Image (spheres, helix red, strand yellow):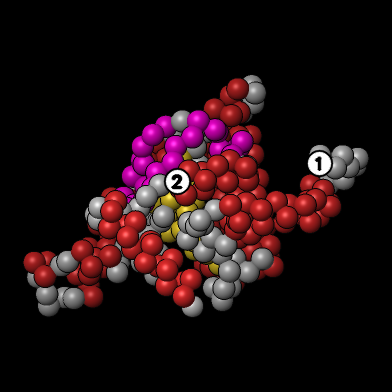
Amino acid sequence: MPFLVLAATDDEVARINEPFLFLKTLKFLSMMKSIPEHIAIIMDGNGRWAKKRFLPRFMGHQKGVKMVKKIVSHCAELGVTSLTLFAFSTENWKRPQEEVSQLMRLFLSALQREVQKLNENNVQLKIIGDISKFDPEIIEHIQKAEAATAQNAGLKLNIAANYGGRWDIVQAVKAWQVAHPEESVEHLTEEALSQFVCLAEQPEPDLLIRTGGEQRISNFLIWQLAYTELYFTDTLWPNFDEKQLDLAIESFNQRERRFGKTSEQVQAENQAEQQGESSC
C-alpha cells in the first residue's frame, strides 16, 4: 500500500517510496527474459486526455511532459540503453498556430529546466529532426543541451522534433552523396545508407509503443523500424505510467523475433546458447 504523505512534493514522495519501487523493479526484471535495448514511443493522446477533462489541449501536453520524466527514469532503471520519443513531427506544423506556439514554448522550457537533471542521472540527450525550422533561441538551447550531456554514459534519450521518416531517408541519401561525390547512386546499398540515417550509431529499436489507440507508425523512424516489434495501446500518453511500460515489455517478451528465419531455427539457436551458458 503506497504511503499517504500530507503536504509533500512529488519529489519527496518519490524519495520515500524509492526503496519499494527499486524492489518492485528488481522483481519485474527477474521475470523478464530480456529487456528491449532500444524502445521508441509515439506519445499520442495528450489532447484527448485534456478534452475528456474539459481542459485546454495545452494542459494535456503539460501533463505529457511529466509522464516523459517518469518513463525516462523507469527506462534507466530497467537497463534500456536507448529511448526515442516522437515529440513533434514535420506534419505537426499544420496544427492551429496557437497550439504550435504553446508546444514550442513547452519545448524550450523543458530544454532550459531539465538539462541539469539529465546530467545528474547520466542521461545523454540527442535531438533528431530538421532543427533548422525552429526559432534561433530553441536551436541554441538544443545545441547547449546536447553538448552539456554528450559525455554521459547512461541512457541515450533521443527526442524526435520536426522529424519525419521520409525526411530522414531523403537527408540520408543527400548525406551519402556528399560523402561520396565521385560515386553513382547505383553503388548505394542498404548498408551504406543505414550509416547516414538518424541514430545510425545506436541499435535499431526493438520495441515501438504507440499510445492513444491509433495503430500506425505515422512517418516515424520508417527505416529503423523494419524489424521492430509493435505494441499499440488505448492508454492515452498522460496515463502511460511505469506499469503500462512494464505491460508493453511483457508483451515484447512473448514475441519470437525471427529476422527471416524459421521458428525452428530460432529455437535451436536459443537452445544452443543456453547450453553454452550452462557449460561455462
Q: Which residues are magenta?
A: 214-240
Looking at the image, residue 43 lies above or below residue 36:
above
**Quarter occupied by residue 219:** top left
Pointer 1: residues within 10 angstroms few (<14), some, or many (20+)? few
Tell me: 266 left or right of 22: left
User: Of 67 and 56, which appears nearest the observer?
Assistant: 67
User: Of 99 and 47, which appears nearest the observer?
Assistant: 47
Quarter holding the N terminus is: top right
Pointer 2: residues within 10 angstroms few (<14), some, or many (20+)? few
Q: Are marks 2 and 1 in contact (CB under 8 Å)?
A: no
Spatial separation of the CA atoms under disc 2 and disc 1: 30 Å
- Secondary element under disc 1, as helix, strand or loop, is loop
Tell me which residue sits at (19%, 70%) in the image.
177
Q: Which residue is mark 1?
A: 2
Res. 43 visible in picture: yes
Tell me: 116 left or right of 280: right
Tell me: 203 left or right of 193: right
User: Of 122 and 106, which appears nearest the observer?
Assistant: 122
Q: Which residue is mark 2?
A: 254
